[in-house]
Image (tube, rainbow, N blue to C red):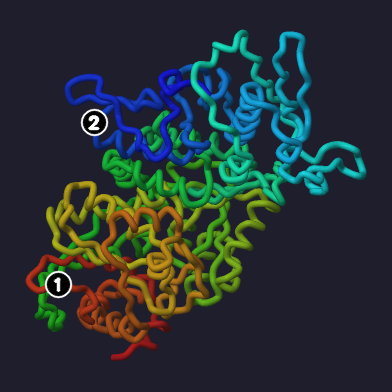
Amino acid sequence: MPPSNELHVTICPKGKRPKPICIGSGKYKCQFCSRMGEYAALVAHIQTHEKTAIEFQEKKIYKCNLGCSKSSHYHCCCCKRTIISRNYFTEHIHKCALSLNMQLHAPCSSSLVPSTTTASSNGFTSPINTSVPICSDSNGSDPQCSEDGATGSLNVLDIKVKSPSPPSSPTSLTAPVPPFNCQDILMSVNPMHNICTGSLKVLTSRPKRITCCFCNLILNKKNIKVHIQRRHMSDNPDLLQTNGINHTPVTSGNMEDLVAEGITLKMLNDARETVMSSPLGVIKTPMILLSQTTLPLQVPCNAYLKLENMQRTGSFKIRGVANQFARRSRGDHFVTMSAGNYGKSFAYASKHYGTKGKVVMPETAPISRSLLIQSFGIEVERVPTTCLLDVVHRCVQEEKMTFLHSYNDLDLIAGHASLGFEILEMLPNPDVVVVCCGGGGLLAGVAAVIKLSGCEDTRIYGVEPEGACTMYKSFIEKKPVGMDSKSVASGLAPPFAGALPYAMCQKYVEEIVLVTDDEIRSAVSALYKAGLVVEPSGSAAFAALINSKIPDVIGKNVVVILSGGNVGKDELTSFPD
């Protein structure tokens, strides 16, 4: 292997964290790409490169975006080659190291590798044939390394990799190469490889279809990057850093985290302007100070109620829908899943824009909401909660519809964030903000705005019903989880927590608290007596406050969002007087 001072800058010692390079007074540069900025920002940025790095022996090789070639690539530490594909590079570097090792050392015993070297006229041994599998079994009985009985061909992926040329003279390599250990292959090989009894077999089967983490559109895996760039990030350059997300594999659990880290206040403010200028007629709802005269409850704080039950279509959902429809093609046939409020806003927008649509609803949603959505000319299909996503996927695949997610969508969350701006306009520095949480879209958007606006000391709490606590369980499991949700607050009972809202809530939300269905019913009744018609889902945050579920609120300025008022007379009769 070449000496360390000849290695490319993207090849670092294993265990040593790379740092930004100082290029001037207070200015730094990433050593793996052309991004420049402040030191703290670049330290966080460099972490995005970790996801594509490859560990090999005592080195860690990062993907290079320095402009050596048109595409991002890896530099081999054993030869001068650059390779774009991560999987191909992983296989190449192990073969290249083995080939180089055999040139410098005595021939390996037959117990290590198959005998593939021949003497050349100049006294050097030719590199081994890198198109055959490497085995550690001396008897060659491993079926993974044998020829296919049906075809007579080797059972490995056919990859065209050139072997490095032999050195022109023995002095051309100045640094000693440690003896090659076959175990390095077994320990450092990419997870796409399958290790069985010392053999190396490259899996040829790969998933052909993948679901977009923002809009849940199902498409070919090779097209996912282009889709995300064009559909979700073309208007949000702050999210799409040239060498960050753009070169990160789209897999569950890392794209959402990167997007959550990349969301900026400017991006959310741009979405707010889109929402407030929308032809759907989104309004600034009032925020009132709770009066002990109209609502005689012993609440030991200054409680401000944000009345989203007075919003167009009766809930906050129209905010996110306005931003979604503003960024979608007008001729699409949309499908969504909703327990009512999002479905109503979706139907209202579809009728306004003249688009066709379908709402898949859980059977637990009130019949009155299904009838209301149908009155807008939208098709409704009621199914069990656990079957919601299956029915949506069927509509996407068989009927070629476009899926608009009701909470796990970046455009939707950015639209909901407009509510956070309104809170800060009326109360610039609240002590506590309490938000109901279903899939997590509203909670994520409001929390992001408040924290990014500089209110670092503001505590933000999400509230869920005990029978539908997907976000609460996700916080415990440290990943988005689902459950068979059931609650009187059907709007807060999704089948699973959204991956993107979860990543944002982990970053900005202090805690998720739980309330019982009885506490929600009592909150609905208390608000109704004060002249406020609020549905069970919209009353959950208020229920948490009046039942002392929110800690340390004595004398504090607390904002409680009443998120919706779509409740029928038949539902109100079931609540206590």
Q: Which residue shows up at 68% across the image and 45% down it?
A: 206
Q: Is residue 155 above or below residue 12?
A: below
Using the image as rendered, state which of residue 154 and residue 464 is in the foreground.
154
Using the image as rendered, state which of residue 176 and residue 252 is in the foreground.
176
Amino acid of disc 1: Asp
Helix, strand or loop at disc 2?
loop
The answer to whether residue 329 is seen in the rendering is no
Image-based side of 273 in relation to 433, left or right: right
| Tag 2 residue | 38
Using the image as rendered, state which of residue 210 and residue 560 is in the foreground.
210
The residues tagged by marks 1 and 2 sit, at their Cα atoms, a distance apart of 37 Å
Q: Position of residue 335 (x, y in %)?
A: 57, 55
Query: Which quadrant holds residue 84?
Result: top right
Residue 265, numbered label: none
Using the image as rendered, state which of residue 48 and residue 519 is in the foreground.
48
| Tag 1 residue | 552
Q: Is residue 14 above or below residue 380?
A: above
Labels 1 & 2 near each other (Cβ < 8 A): no
Q: Residue furthest bottom?
A: 577
Q: Position of residue 87 (x, y in %)?
A: 61, 36
Q: Which residue shows up at 24% across the image and 62% down it?
A: 460
The answer to whether residue 62 is seen in the rendering is yes
Amino acid of disc 2: Glu
Helix, strand or loop at disc 1?
loop
Q: Residue furthest right?
A: 150
**Few, some or many C-alpha atoms within 10 Å of disc 1 (few <14, some 14-19, many ≥20)?**
few
Q: Is residue 386 above or below residue 327?
A: below
Image-based side of 547 in relation to 55, left or right: left
Q: Which residue shows up at 57% across the image and 48% down it?
A: 217
